[in-house]
Image (cartoon, helix red, strand yellow):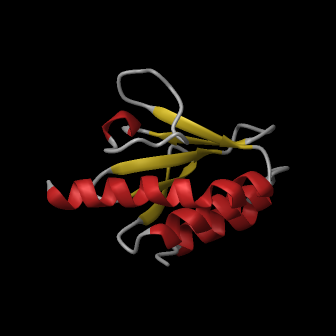
């Protein structure tokens, strides 16, 4: 996993009612593909490979919101991605069980992004 110490430190300081869910989502991103890296951008953990893939919105409190900055460009059919806009997509995880139940779908999105960017 490409854990960034800056992100680890930021998360250690984070006070959030769903911190365990945030950490579980982070783990799925980082384990999904070795090309994924992370940083703190826009006051959020952000995952990247050849551009910004997604950020976790720490302001959401009833669920963990993940914004896929260019989600409409991710190839393939991914039911986990919600939204109808021209570019962004999102997904939400209300609890650990939802992360566990959808981790394969989330990892597939990460791999699809990395594979597409590697071809470009």
Residue 32 locus on image (x, y percent): 48, 68
| Residue 53 on image: x %, y % | 40, 49
Whether 119 is drawn above or below 53: the answer is below
| Left or right, 27 with reference to 77 | right
Q: Quadrant of residue 20?
A: bottom right
What residue is shown at x 66% (from left), y 40% (from top)?
A: 92
Dividing the picture into quadrants, the one containing residue 75 is: top left
Write the residue at 60% across / 62% down: 26
The residue most toward the bottom is 1
Q: Is residue 84 left or right of residue 80?
A: left
Whether residue 36 is situated above or below residue 60 in the rendered picture: below
Left or right of 106, for residue 49: left
Extreme residue toward the left, this view: 120
Residue at (51% x, 72% y) in the render: 31
* Residue located 24% across and 54% down the image: 116
Please state the total of marks drawn on the protein image.
Answer: 0
**Of the pair 9 and 2, the residue shown nearer to us:** 2
> Eyeballing the image, is 100 above or below 2?
above
Where residue 107 appears, as percent x and y from the top left, is 50, 60
Q: Residue furthest top?
A: 85
Residue 112 picture location, percent across and down: 35, 55
Q: Is residue 55 left or right of residue 100?
A: left
């Amino acid at each position: 996993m490409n854990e960034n110490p800056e992100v680890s430190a930021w998360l250690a300081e984070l006070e959030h009612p769903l911190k365990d869910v945030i950490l579980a989502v982070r783990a799925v991103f980082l384990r999904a593909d070795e090309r994924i890296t992370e940083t703190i951008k826009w006051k959020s953990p952000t995952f990247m490979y050849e551009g910004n893939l997604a950020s976790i919105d720490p302001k959401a409190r009833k669920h963990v919101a993940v914004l896929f900055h260019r989600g409409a460009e991710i190839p393939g059919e991914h039911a986990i991605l919600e939204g109808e806009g021209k570019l962004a997509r999102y997904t939400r995880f209300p609890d650990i069980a939802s992360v566990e139940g959808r981790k394969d779908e989330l990892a597939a999105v990460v791999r699809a992004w990395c594979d597409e960017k590697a071809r470009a």
